[in-house]
Amino acid sequence: MTVKIPYYPGCTLKATAKNFEDTARLVAGVFDYELDDLYRWNCCGAVYGLSEDNVMHKVAPVRNLLRVKEVGEKRVLTLCSMCFNTLKRANYYVRKNKDKLEVINAIMYLENTTYDGSVEVIHLLELLRDEIGFDKVKKAVKKPLSGITVASYYGCLLLRPNEIAIDNMEQPTVMEDLMEALGASVIDLNVKTECCGAYQTVPRKDLVADRTNLIVEEARKAGADLIITSCPLCHFNLDRRQKEAKERHPDFHPMPILYFTQLMALAFGFEEEKLGFKPHYVDPRPLLKERGLL
Amino acid sequence: MAEQEVLNKEEERKPQAKMVPVFIMGQKYEVPEGSTILNAIEYAGYQLKKGVGCREGFCGACATVYRLPGDYKLRGGLACQTVVQPGMYLAQLPFTPAQKAIYDIDEVKPDITTFQKFYPEAFRCLGCNACSKVCPQELKVMDYIQAIMRGDLELAADLSFDCIMCGLCTMRCPAEMAQYNIALLARRLYGKYMMPKPEFLYKRIEDIEQGKFDKEFEEIMSLSPDELKKRYAERDINFKIT
């Protein structure tokens, strides 16, 4: 029987990272899960506010958690690492600071209910690892990804701070384990938890291009063919800034950057048109064709 | 006796309606119970040249803010639709200054980039919902801004459809945007580029232009009033649009 799991999309998953959402739906469907969009949602808050007493910046994420509670659900699934981080940290904050939760509930007086910290925020990677299990993932593979070597890039948002981390914050392995279950070779990327440059991509393209250069080159040196991520912002920086990286570093070689769900959908046998490769700046198709996967 | 007559006449002159006290811009007035805020302000002697319009709740010109005794909430409404309550503190807003982008609707795209260009402040929305709290139309103002922020113009057009552009949301927004002008752009884009086209209407216009109904129209025009009434009474009201 299909399990409907409440799903908080976030703005990017409905716009530039549509291919992440589409492939995540395919992947979830393989295990009889259906991502059920919240009937009403707003911005996650995009970047968790570090000021402890500025509750206004926590209203947006908490309102989304209230939406989950409002429909009688106990957990909410996210795909975007930024949404995951902002929602889970806001949840952690209101659980620890009941007085602040009271203030936020008072601001949200138009709502039919109040929030109480009861909702769990989970990431798709956690669902795959802890509930579905990588053994099941392995069994669902129709086209093993043998022949490609994958570097997993986590960035910061899935792992920091430690209170919300989905894995060991210094040595995460969840994405490597997942890729091994799909039959791919994996490498241990030494910079997998380092910063991609984040929103500096707007005012300081040069700085982000240098980060991209570093991360891609480290992956190449370790023998990777491509890099996977779960964060649309990391994806944007690592993929799109390869243009500037090439301009600044003549020896730079392009490398495809994929969402982990795209590789899963590929391994589960979905056809090429459903994998959402078109929006990529660095087209992964030549590599995948060369390795006999497309 | 003369003194008593004067007193009696004064009694007669007293208004028959029960009066309630209100504070208009800090000054106390007694106004008839059941008055709208607009009527109360005019009863008190103010002549409104701005901040008043259709007086029927449609035009959105008479945005007003008020507080009720013992309640911290700053409330908003339309002065022509909101009935005074005893002890109400009120003020009439003459106008809402708001940024309004100039664009050529034929040259803008129905997607998020148009809003990033013309109304970048929309993306400062904090999700506080102050806009929805004050909306006299009870619209989900924050939700339609959020829909625009993720490029869902259909939802934004739908949620903002009943906006009368009174400006109260704009006066309360901590992100300092003009929600109603942003929503207007969303509805224009949706209407021009995304809404299903009424093909039957185009066909009917073509028929009319080709003179398909000229003969019938001439016939109708030649009828006497009595014949017209007869035709009207006998008309088929269950016709189907084809």
Image (cartoon, coloured by chain):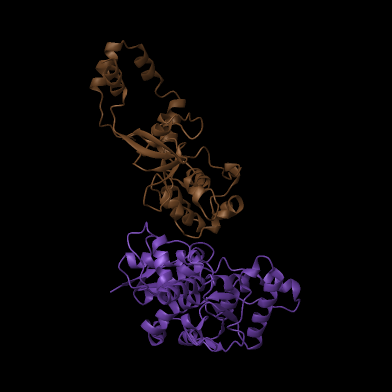
Q: Does residue B235 appear left or right of residue A216 in this picture? A: left
Residue at image location 69% in from the left, 68% down from the top: A204
Please identify which colour was used for chain A in the image: purple
Residue at image location 43% in from the left, 69% down from the top: A100
Between B51 and A178, the one lying in front of the other is B51
Between A246 and A90, the one lying in front of the other is A90
Q: Is residue B153 above or below residue A221?
A: above
Callout count: 0
For residue B7, what is the image quadrant?
Answer: top left
Image coordinates for residue B105, horizontal then vertical, percent: 57, 42
Q: Is residue A282 visible?
A: no
Q: Is residue A133 above or below residue B74?
A: below
Image coordinates for residue B45, horizontal then vertical, percent: 45, 29
Image coordinates for residue A281, horizontal then vertical, percent: 62, 68
Kindly give the residue lying farthest to the top in the view shown: B224
Between B183 and A225, the one lying in front of the other is B183
Kindly give the residue lying farthest to the left in the view shown: B234
Q: Is residue A75 visible?
A: yes
Q: Is residue B178 above or below residue A47?
A: above
Residue at image location 74% in from the left, 79% down from the top: A251
Image coordinates for residue B183, horizontal then vertical, percent: 49, 47
Between B173 and B90, the one lying in front of the other is B90
- Looking at the rendering, in which quadrant would you find the N terminus of chain A? bottom left
Please identify which colour was used for chain B in the image: brown
For residue B90, what is the image quadrant?
Answer: top left
